[in-house]
Amino acid sequence: MASSLHVVLFPFMAKGHTIPILHLARLLLRRNAAVTIFTTPSNHPYISASLSDTPTTIISLPFPQNIPGIPAGVESTDKLPSMSLFLPFVSSTKLLKPDFEHALKTLETPPTFMITDGFFGWTLDSANKFDIPRLVYYGMSNFAITISRVIVN
């Protein structure tokens, strides 16, 4: 029985964010949801291998090039030469927005909703543009989020 539920998942390009989303994808698939995962070319093989026994659709978006300090081909935090480049890396993901929106627009089945990583705040604009409900995924535990907020405030 085909499902009319189509979920778009977009994890941040770090294994600690991607792995839980892959587990979520499997749970959604068990409920007969169609699942589309967005990623980048360098992260595609890992996601594809992890879900090779499933009907998951994986869409690769070209990662932005010529980002100061970030070597060409670096598309995941574990490949950054220094964690001092973490914020520029996160900021560079905003440049994925045009390709993400184009891909959303051309999906064969419109998404029922999307779940995007907390680092991808810009996906809220995309979700609103296409009238797709958006949920935010934070990979940190509630305790870690609470401590972070206490320290910042």
Image (tube, rainbow, N blue to C red):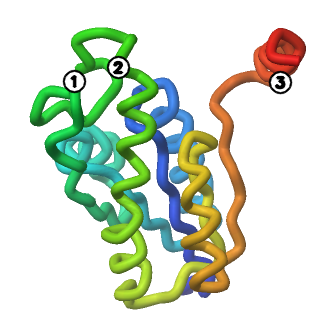
Relative to 73, residue 116 above or below: below
Q: Nearer the viewer, residue 88 or 134?
A: 88
User: How would you rate the neighbour count of disc 1 (Cα within 10 Å): few for under 14, some for 14-19, many for 20 or more?
Assistant: few
Could you say where residue 58 lies in the image, as x and y percent from the top left? 31, 61
Residue pointed to by mark 2:
85
Residue pointed to by mark 1:
69
Q: Residue furthest left?
A: 72
Q: Quadrant of residue 13?
A: top left
CA gap, disc 1 and disc 3: 32 Å
Q: Which of the two discs, 1 and 2, labels the residue nearer the N terminus? A: 1
Residue lying at 45% horizontally and 26% vertically, measured from the top left: 87
Q: Quadrant of residue 141?
A: top right
| Label 2 element class | helix
Q: Which of the two discs, 1 and 3, labels the residue nearer the N terminus? A: 1
CA gap, disc 2 and disc 3: 26 Å
Taking 100 as reference, is 11 left or right?
Answer: right
Could you say where residue 68 lies in the image, as x and y percent from the top left? 22, 31
Q: Which mark is residue 142?
A: 3
